[in-house]
Image (cartoon, rainbow, N blue to C red):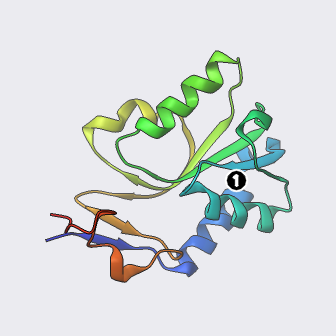
Amino acid sequence: MTEKFQLPVEKLRALVRSYIKDEQFKGIKNIYGIPKGGIPFAVALANFSHLPLLLKASDITDDTLVVDDILDSGDTLLKFNNLRKAKDIHPVYGVIVTKINEFNLEARKLLTFQGYEVEGIDWVVFPWEDDKNVSKKLDGTEIE
């Protein structure tokens, strides 16, 4: 059976506010969301903080907060970071949910901002997702 973690809107709002109040947030000049899961979170952060939302990864600087919805295997964040490092750009990273496992230790070290930590969860349902479809993969087959 699929173990789900439901993230209510209220918790997401509280997380956004905690990011903005954090001392480390003061140096942030703009926000970028890693497509596609990071975009809704980046929009929320930009709206609450009144900081510009970047639409192109090529505009990222050392003063950019780069966010994603979830750190699962860590592959997305590591690949994204390696592309930035090749250009000598070192942005600040944050996620909404971190799945705690032995595979993403290196990626977790990159995080300045981390929301909720979960263990033993197969699927996270975000407020902008349709909960009815979380038990199916894109091809329509059931998630085991």
Residue at (47, 71) in percent of width and height: 126
Residue at (76, 49) in percent of width and height: 55
Give the tally of numbered discs.
1
Q: In this picture, is 52 found above or below 143?
A: above
Q: Nearer the viewer, residue 22 or 8?
A: 8
Rendering coords of residue 130 (x, y %): 44, 79
The reply, left or right, for residue 80 in relation to residue 4 is: right
Residue at (29, 64) in percent of width and height: 137
Rendering coords of residue 21 (x, y %): 73, 59
Classify mark 1: residues with Cα within 10 Å, few (<14), some (14-19) or many (20+): few
Q: Which residue is mark 1?
A: 22
Rendering coords of residue 42 (x, y %): 68, 58
Q: Quadrant of residue 102?
A: top left
Instruction: Say which element carries label 1.
Output: loop
Residue at (61, 72) in percent of width and height: 14
Under mark 1, the amino acid is Asp
The reply, left or right, for residue 4 in relation to residue 18 is: left
